Structures are given as C-alpha cells and as structure tokens.
Amino acid sequence: MTRVLRINEKNIDHNKIRYAAEQIKKGKLVVFPTETVYGIGASAFDEEACKKIFEVKHRAADNPLIVHICDFRQLQSIAAVSQNLLDKIKKVWPGPVTFVLKKKVLPDIVTAELDTAAVRMPGNKIALELIRESGVPIAAPSANISTFPSATEARHAIKDFNGRVSVIIDGGRSRFGLESTVINLSRKPYTLLRPGAYDLKDLERVFGRIIVPKKINDTKKSGKVLSPGMKYRHYSPNTRLVLFSDNDLISEAVRLAKLNKLRFALLCSEETAVNFRNERVIILGSRKDLGSIAKNLFSSLRKLDTFNVDIGFIESFDEHGIGLPIMNRLIKASVGNIVGHRGDLLKIFNSG
Ligand code: AMP
Ligand code: MG
C-alpha cells in the first residue's frame, strides 16, 4: 500500500515528515518533491533499498543515482572535497545543481561501481526535512519509470508508482520542472554532464570555466559516454514526438498531417498557438518566459499521451539560459525526430 501525504512547504507538518522518514529508515521507498522534479528515494547507505529503486523504475544498473544531502557534514562523509571546493559549493547549495565528486563511502549499487558520486543539496524544505529526519543521505533518481518524462507533480508519481512505494509526498508542482544541472568536479577541467535548472553562466562565476562537451545532446547509444545516464532513451512520451528546429515548418507539417489523415497535437508557446486556433494544442507557456515553458514541459509531454493522437509536434526554443536544458530534454524526448528542413518532413510522413 502507498500512503499519499500532502505537505505544504510553507507550513510543514512534522508528523508526516516523521512517518516518511521512518519508512526510509526501514529500507522502504519514499517519493518526495524537490525544486527540480520529484525524486524516488531510499537510504543511500542501504544497498537492498537502493536495489528496489532500480527495480521499480526499470532503471539500468549502470546508471548511478544522485545522493541528496541536507548538510555539509553529510557531504564530507560520502565524498572527498577540498576546503577550496567546499567554499565554492557552499555558494550554490541548496540549489538545482549536482556535483560529481570523488566518492568516499557509499554502496557500489548507488554509484554504479564508479569511484565518483553525484551529490546534491536540494532547495526544497520538505526534501531537506525528510533527509534530516531520516538521519541518512537519500539516493534518489527522478520519480518516473525509466525512459518516460520526469514527474513534476505528485499525481505523475502516483500514476507510475502507486502500490510500489511506501509513501508519496505531495508537495505541489515542482518550482523549476527540469532536473538539476550536473557538473563533474572530480577532475579538471570541470565539465558539464547534464544541462539543467541551474544556469551554467552563474555556475561559471563561482567555479570558473566549465567545458560543455559537443556530445551533450547526443541521442546515439554508441561511442564513449560522458555520464552513464546520457546513453539511455530519456524523457520520451509514448506518442511519437517530432521537434521542429525550424518552427516555420510547423504549418507545413500540420497541412501534411491532415493530408495523410494523421491525428496530431501541437505542443507550443501561447505566441505560436494563436496561429493554430482550430487545432489540438497543448500550451507550454510563453516564449517571453522560458521558465514557464520549463515548468510545464514534462506535464505537457505526459498530457500528450492522454490525447489519443498519432503524433505530437513540438516547437523549439532559443538555447539561452534555461532554454539550453529545455532543448536538451526536447532533443532526447524526440529521439532524433527533428525537422530542420522541408526534406525532413517527407522522412517523418513516409515512415508513418
Ligand atoms: P536522474 O537519475 O534522472 O536524476 O539522473 C542522474 C544523472 O546523474 C544521470 O545522468 C547519471 O548518469 C548522472 N550521474 C550520477 N552519478 C554519476 C557519476 N558518478 N558520474 C557521472 N554521472 C553521474
Ligand atoms: Mg531521470
């Protein structure tokens, strides 16, 4: 049985936190909100409990988990950090950035046998209280079945994990709606492993130059991967998704879809939606506020699957600021179905 506990971040009910923390201590799984997306968590020191995370998520064993902490004492118990680096990390935590660091003590299953650990102090009071009350760091990947869009509302996690976890804490909608930025600090030069909710430019002000690998948006499974999670299909709805790197081609796609009797939905900004008043549209937010697009992105991808259509068309956004992780998620979610030229449309419609 799964208990759903509604907790208000501004007025935390500590009895509910205590109940959830008891479950963590007993080796059970707890879904909890963070400022990025919802996490499915277990005690990071409990190998058996962490194994269950991989099972219920259908997550590949070589894809390591992020360990969530509530204070710097916990950080120093699981990772080796110099005083100089610690001073810098203190400037950005709690917050939506994860650091890969030299690992000290953690079960191999958590770090997929790597000698590094990914660690984050989340900027959500419910998450911090849960970790504090549990007395252990909490290993937690995003609370979704692997390959599907992340959960940004408790109801998403309920759909994916009802009956498979002990507690789902409903803390409302995630503030950012995109996962944390992941930076490898375990060796120099520092590199970006995943663009995310923390702006890279702001991080560079604290940590100096951070290398952005060319392969950061790769959807191919071959070759050397920077971070294990990058080689897997990710964020995809069940419905076939087509991303327009040239948004001017959307109207042509709509025309061709009608000609080919394909049922489609358009996922776009409110500015684009005014040109498609008679179509099935899911509004992502405003182009003038990319934060609103980020916040609605995963729930919109999940919504697409409730529409009973053959195909989803999604517009692209400028890769500035939060636009960078938005486009990273869209490129991965559309698994290479990207339209940048007229010729790409033919490929999309010919492959049915
Ligand atoms: P998620 O579970 O969706 O929050 O994703 C966690 C991300 O962090 C995945 O892309 C992992 O590959 C990455 N990650 C976790 N631990 C490490 C590590 N030790 N080294 C490199 N990447 C890591
Ligand atoms: Mg994930």
Image (cartoon, rainbow, N blue to C red):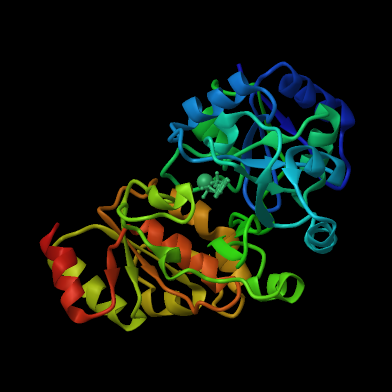
Q: Nearer the viewer, residue 345 or 93?
A: 93
| Horizontal and vertical percent position of residue 301 | 44, 54
| Horizontal and vertical percent position of residue 19 | 80, 22
Q: Nearer the viewer, residue 113 or 222?
A: 113
Say which residue appears at 32% left-offset and 56% top-offset.
223
Whether residue 115 is visible to the viewer of this picture, yes or no, is yes
In what quadrant of the picture does the N terminus appear? top right
In what quadrant of the picture does the C terminus appear? bottom left
Say which residue appears at 72% left-offset and 70% top-offset.
207
The answer to whether residue 38 is above or below residue 28 is below
The residue at the far left in this view is 350
Q: Nearer the viewer, residue 330 or 254?
A: 330
The answer to whether residue 59 is above or below residue 319 is above
Q: Quadrant of residue 186?
A: bottom right
- Would residue 209 appear left or right of 251 to someone viewing this image? right
Say which residue appears at 56% left-offset and 45% top-offset.
151
The residue at the far bottom in this view is 248
Q: Quadrant of residue 94?
A: bottom right
The answer to whether residue 347 is above or below residue 219 is below
Q: Nearer the viewer, residue 277 or 298?
A: 298
Q: How many marks?
A: 0
| Horizontal and vertical percent position of residue 296 | 56, 59
Whether residue 303 is visible to the viewer of this picture, yes or no, is no
- Would residue 181 appear left or right of 232 to someone viewing this image? right
| Horizontal and vertical percent position of residue 10 | 86, 48
